[in-house]
Amino acid sequence: MQEHEQNCNYEPIACRNLGCPRKVSKFDMEAHLKECGYAMVDCKFCKTKMKRLALEVIYIDLVSFYQCHIVFAVDYQ
């Protein structure tokens, strides 16, 4: 039984990304790590490493900023 628990792919384990509260089965961990908001990723513009969640917020803000200014420029030409 103990050997099964150690080798079972459905055993929930904590995500290894600092700050992530999720426990995911060993079987699902690879997929979770690809989407985990606490994973450190490179910004595609400046290559700075930051948590995926923070980067997504920055990208959303940038898109909103540019959409607002493009609409403003088109409306007032």
Image (cartoon, helix red, strand yellow):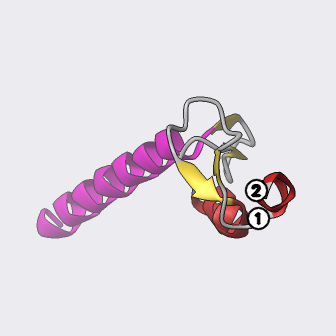
The location of residue 74, given as percent across then percent down, is 21, 69
Q: Quadrant of the C terminus?
A: bottom left
Mark 1: few/some/many CA within 10 Å (<14, 14-19, 20+): few
64 in the magenta segment = yes
Q: Going by the picture, which residue comes out furthest to the left?
A: 75
Farthest-out residue, front? 1
Q: Position of residue 42 (x, y in %)?
A: 72, 46
Q: Which mark is residue 67?
A: none
Q: Residue at x 76, y 56 (%)?
A: 5
Q: Which residues are magenta?
A: 51-77
Task: Where is residue 33? Give x, y as percent.
Answer: 67, 56
Q: Main secondary structure of the magenta part?
A: helix
Q: Reply above or below: 26 against 19.
A: below
- Write down the residue under mark 2: 5
Residue at position x 45%, y 43% in the image:
58
Residue where numbered disc 1 is placed: 8
Q: Image quadrant for the N terminus?
A: bottom right
The 10 Å Cα crowd at callout 2, few under 14, some 14 to 19, many 20 or more, is few
Instruction: State the image coordinates of residue 28 (x, y, percent, origin top left).
Output: 65, 68
Q: CA distance from mark 1 to mark 2?
A: 5 Å
Counting every numbered tag in the picture gives 2
Which residue: 31% across, 50% down? 65
Q: Is residue 34 magenta?
A: no
Q: Nearer the viewer, residue 37 or 42?
A: 37
Residue 3 in which image quadrant:
bottom right
Amino acid bearing label 1: Cys
Instruction: Give, as a three-letter code, the residue at label 2.
Output: Glu
Q: Are dots 1 and 2 in contact, CB under 8 Å?
A: yes
Element under disc 1: loop
Relative placement, left or right, of 40 versus 62 is right
Q: Quadrant of residue 27?
A: bottom right
